[in-house]
Amino acid sequence: MRMSYSQIAQLELLDALNSINSEDELNEFKNVLAHYFAQKAQKAIDALWDEGVISEETIEQWGKEHMRTPYGYEKHRS
């Protein structure tokens, strides 16, 4: 049975995590992952911009949206 790319990635991450020996190394690893995914997101946004899917108006509209999830705080209060 052949492993999926997701399974291979999980094994690679576990191997990388085994070499972390300090909080500083853990923080550095987390920063590398965050930077990687931020770059992917930026490339996707740039592609949407280039294709005309989003514009300055779209971004301004997003800034005005209220996107919080209602948690029902009052229901769970003691």
Image (spheres, rainbow, N blue to C red):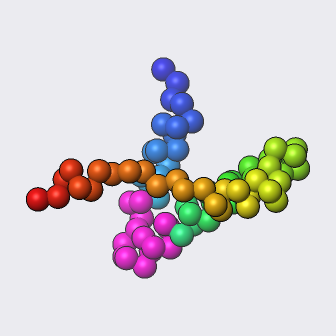
User: Residue 67 at what x, y percent from top left?
Assistant: 52, 53
Residue 16 lies within the magenta run: no
Q: Camera-side residue: 50 or 11?
A: 50
Residue extending furthest toward the bottom: 24
Q: How many badges with numbers are in the image?
A: 0
Residue 21 lies within the magenta run: yes
Q: Does 56 sit left or right of 39 as displayed?
A: right
Specify the quadrant of the image occupied by residue 46.
Answer: bottom right
Residue extending furthest toward the front: 74
Q: Camera-side residue: 38 or 55?
A: 55
At a point 50% along the width and 73% down the height, the residue shown is 28
Q: Quadrant of the C terminus?
A: bottom left
At a point 50% along the width and 49% down the height, the residue shown is 12
Q: Does 19 sit left or right of 66 as displayed?
A: left
Q: Camera-side residue: 62 or 38?
A: 62
Most common SS among magenta residues: helix
User: Residue 59 at what x, y percent from top left?
Assistant: 74, 58
At a point 65% along the width and 62% down the height, the residue shown is 63
Q: Does 73 sit left or right of 60 as displayed?
A: left
For residue 3, above or below residue 10: above
Specify the quadrant of the image occupied by residue 42.
Answer: bottom right
Residue extending furthest toward the left: 78
Please report the bounds of the magenta region as a residue range. Answer: 17-30
Q: Is residue 38 visible?
A: no
At a point 38% along the width and 60% down the height, the residue shown is 18
User: Residue 70 at what x, y percent from top left?
Assistant: 38, 51
Q: Is residue 72 visible?
A: yes
